[in-house]
Image: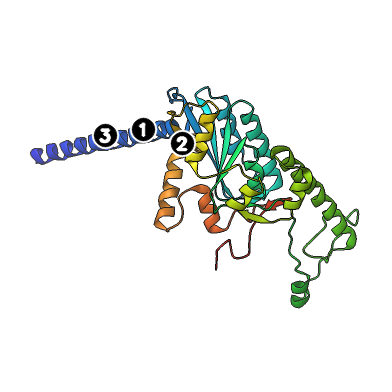
Amino acid sequence: MATRADDLIDRRRLRRKLTFWRVAAVVVLVIALVVGSSALMGDGPWTPASGAHVARISVEGTIVEDEELLERIERVRKSDAVKGVILTVDSPGGTTVGGEAIFEAVRALAEEKPVVAQVGTLAASAGYMIASAADHIVARQSSIVGSIGVLVQFPDVTGLMDKIGVELVEIKSSPLKAEPSPFNETTPAERAMMRAMILDSYDWFVDLVTDRRPLSRDEVLALADGSIFTGRQAAERRLVDALGGEKTARAWLTEQGVDADLKVVEWKPRDRGGVTLVPGFLAAAAARLLGLPQDGPQLLRALGAERIFLDGLLSVWQPENGGEID
């Protein structure tokens, strides 16, 4: 009996030791992941000073006032290691305010470092606004560029309300308060109010493009009817400066005095708070199991969620069939 008792005690001791080392191994792994992610995302608490390089900043998906992206652009501006910037743009547009905020951040960056925009599949509306903040724009021959303009969209559900027998009762201080509304037919005064807002933002957008491109205001107005262009057409109309990809963008930076041998480093979004790395990893794993994109913005697009959160004036090109060619 004593031998069996000793065996049980030894097994329990061994089990406790195994548990300790398993926990220790998990803690070490988590710390390694946090340190590794900080190193990849730039100037984290454990990140060594990076050598001289060209920074790549990606602007993708629907444009909103993205605080993380604005902070990333500012960190690139302040980094002595960054000698030039490639701004990759692949966006149909988004909110006008979001485009304005990112445009101003890129302009501040371009005041201190050479910045070239490289258009991917699409740089339309607010996406083109952001690309125009760069000192040079490169697009693929088949890229989609343009759609200079502003719009406001809202549904009219009055017919549906009549069919299901729902009546809206509202008490407000003045006729234009909270108008236009999907629950009322728009009046001439409401449409005039919205049109004045849209035209004011449109004039601002046209002036912005006129200031940034080698075009007169009349030439910009001729292009600013909402039309989109291929990269080749955009180059002919001087909406972009050159045709090509990152190699072409990199060559322009070399012309501006940036060492051709410098490595291009992607400045990726930071993971907030460090400890969120593990939940983020788990979320990515769950998305992978469900066959969904693991990247946050791509996951939102896959779920159609990003459209829900758009508000205010929009500068966006979004065809009904999602941009697919029949």
| Residue 21, numbered circle | 3
Mark 1 or mark 2: name the one nearer the start of the chain.
1
Mark 2 or mark 3: name the one nearer the start of the chain.
3
**Residue 311 visible in rendering:** no
* Most foreground residue, 78 or 154: 78
Residue occupying the far front of the picture = 236
Measured in 3D between alpha carbons, the distance from the residue under mark 3 to the one under mark 1, in whole angstroms, is 16 Å
How far from the left and from the top, in percent, is residue 155?
Answer: 73, 64
Which element type, helix, strand or loop, lies under badge 1? Answer: helix
Which element type, helix, strand or loop, lies under badge 2? Answer: loop
Compared to residue 17, the image places residue 292 above or below, namely below
* Most foreground residue, 263 or 275: 263
Give the residue type that dot 2 points to: Val
Residue occupying the far bottom of the picture = 163
Give the residue type that dot 1 points to: Ala
Compared to residue 267, the image places residue 226 above or below, namely below
Mark closer to the observer (1, 2): 1
Residue at 74% of width from left, 45% of height from top?
205
Residue carrying label 1: 32
Residue at 46% of width from left, 34% of height from top?
265
Mark closer to the observer (2, 3): 2
Q: Say whether marks 1 and 2 touch (CB < 8 Å).
A: no
The quadrant of the image that shows the N terminus is: top left
The quadrant of the image that shows the C terminus is: bottom right
| Residue 275, numbered circle | 2
How far from the left and from the top, in percent, is residue 305?
Answer: 58, 56
**Residue 18 visible in rendering:** yes
Which element type, helix, strand or loop, lies under badge 3? Answer: helix
* Relative to 243, 20 lies left or right: left
Residue at 57% of width from left, 24% of height from top?
78
